[in-house]
Image (tube, coloured by chain):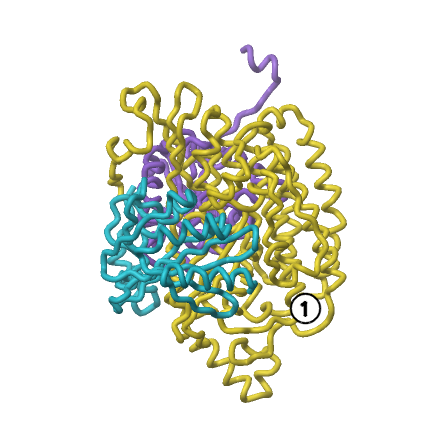
Amino acid sequence: MSETLEQIVKDMKERFAAESTEYAGDKTLILSPEYLLAAIQTLRDEYHFNMIVDVTAVDYWPQQEPRFHVVYHIYSMLNNDILRVRVPLNGNGPHLDTIEKIYPGANWKEREVWDLFGITFDGHSDLRRVVMPYDWQGHPLRKDYPLGYEEVQFTFNAAEIDKRKPYAKD
Amino acid sequence: MGLEEKTGNMGVVTTTLEYVVNWSRTNSMWPLLFGLACCAIEMMGAQASNYDLSRFGMELNRASPRQSDLMIVAGRVSRKMAPVLRQLYDQMPDPKWVLAMGDCASCGGVFNNYAVVQGVDEVVPVDVYVSGCPPRPESLIHGILTLHEKVKKEKITHWA
Amino acid sequence: MTNIREVTVDELRHLVSDRAMTGETMLLNMGPQHPSTHGVLRLLLELDGEIVVNCIPDIGFLHTGVEKNMEAKTYQKAEVMTDRLDYMNSIGNNLAYCLAVEKLVDLDVPVRAQVLRVILAELQRISSHLLWLGTSCLDLAAMSVFLYAMREREMILSVMEMISGQRMMTTYIRPGGVWRDVPQEFVPAVQQIVEVMPGRIAEYESMLTKNMLFTERTQGIGVISAEDCARYGLSGPVIRGSGVAFDLRKARPYSGYEQYDFEVPTYDTGDIFGRYMVRMEEMRQSVRIVRQALSKLSNGPVRSDNRKFVPPPRSEIGVSMEALIHHFKLWTEGFNAPKESVFVTTESPRGILGVFMEGDGGPKPYRVHYVTPSFVNLQSMPLLTRQHFVADVVGIIGSIDIVLGDADR
């Protein structure tokens, strides 16, 4: 972990009332949602984090406050640092500002988070489902969404499952 | 008559219509050029230099379902893909056959979850299942030859 | 099953130009079953005559639910899924996964295993580039390159089969090392590939690089600037083809890549031809790395001896009760990982391959997320295809080397 990243995290903590954690050399900045846009803009313009690597989310259901963490990974080619930014969100239908204007590459990644977690990004230009069918119900990567497991056939239950299985006709 | 004078005595071959039609169907069975996932790479391997599927009259992959006889479902079928797959199947002219290549197409494979159709036989009727994840090109060729055996046994009364 | 929901024009209104609404431009659907989309990609093209006005990619036809499924399996069992994400780079996916697990539970890897990982990852890179070369040239109507490239690819696949018993989905790299030591025939077989490959790469180049049929279809087509690459997060040969020497093997070395001497090829034009040149040179550099790695291959263990995370070798189970207990515990219950999260990045043949992994103190990962290069690179399709002929779209798809399993997960 480089000293510049240490300094950046320290600055960000002061300017945006953030918290930070570290594990195995990964620095994490925990931001509250209202500061997200300003903080990301600052990180890109002043601290040279010019590349968006990832936007994803983690669901902590049944915990409600916060239920979700939206996780950003941004990379600085100049300093060769990766910084993780976590934004905790409460409730079942959370909203967050989009960072698409700052990093155009976040467009699809935010669509994916909306598709799989149901987190709405306000101001997003094209918030459609990206990997699931358009008419799909629910958001599969939420922890309260079932895996959709189909029972495995063994000798004792093969016939029973076979009866239920919707085989195609010509 | 004209032909015999030119070619000499060709002799007479007697056979059944059933046999001739089935024989010709097996020897020019054109697969649909349709790859889904990992198995498609092995399917390409089967058509490339080392395994050379054209030995069985099957080198011509047609990209249009209207011109193909065999659909090789090579890979996992997601819920989003299933209607498309069925549409392709419906567009193929009769007679048509389906070969489920690999574990995912046969039964869902390792992906027992919300997104993957647990066996493509839920969407289209399957003639031959080929196991493996992905199957070797040899397995695919074996599956195709098994299908040929099946086609050769078809009865005139069952023709579509 | 057969009911397909139709997307209304209103839903697309913000994506296409106003001229599409009056019928001046045409909306053309390409895929998901199309011979040149390298899998099940669907592109909605807005055409003005033959010129592409806009291109709207639609993915998800191969969405497999891997990330959800991995949450239901222990750390060892979830690894099997990773091969099947980016099926052209299964070793690289295993590697990224294992690096994440090793970082999460703080596990060391023996030197021999590190070197084996590098050899296999580079062989896999060559095989992936070979398949890219074959298929993308096939799209440009160059059939013979495909047959040549698949011939060499079989050599690499036979090495994979030798070490793991599987040609493609090896799951050979495991947390804490590799599955087991390589057989004796491994080194001669790899040496043969290393001997043969440079000549074969020259053979492909002699067919393509100065071939007018090829250059006319590739030069000046699908140009993207270095700034746009960074803004969109593009990586791998795409950004290197635009003149940025950005390679994570150099920038953030893993598995001991810092010990190898290799160059990061770049090309300035940023078009299809530039990406082609970069990939061809990358194959040469991979051969160079494999050659160096073979000389580094020393004897020693191939798995960590930390028995809390890595199962003991077979030979120990018969004689040691402790080993038997560890084996049993690890394969039934798995190991516990701390309630923390890690992020690792590797350089896949297509770009940045990252794994974000979060543990919850139990034996199953709480969340695994794959940051996949194809997903990111596909986003740039509107940018790359705008104002090009519709016939060039297939060349551009080929040049960014997408794998749909990688994009959809």
Pointer 1 residue: C112
Q: Secondary structure at mark 1?
A: helix
Compared to residue C247, the image places residue A86 above or below, namely below
- Residue for point 56% across, 42% down: C239
User: Residue at image x 60%, y 43%?
Assistant: C244
Nearest to the observer: residue C235 or residue C318: C235
Which quarter of the rendering shows the C terminus of chain B?
top left
What is the display colour for chain A?
Answer: cyan
Quarter of the picture containing the N terminus of chain B is: top right
**Residue C262 vs residue C127, the one in the foreground:** C262
Q: Is residue B94 left or right of residue C402?
A: left
Which chain is drawn using purple?
B
Disc 1: CA contacts within 10 A as few (<14), some (14-19) or many (>=20) = many
Residue, x 34% and y 45% (percent of image)? A130
Compare residues A49 and B125 and report the one nearer the observer. A49
Q: Do we see residue C68 in this rendering?
A: no
Task: Work out whether B18 lies above or below C315.
Answer: above
Give the drawing colour for chain C. Answer: yellow
Residue C10, image x, y percentages: 24, 32
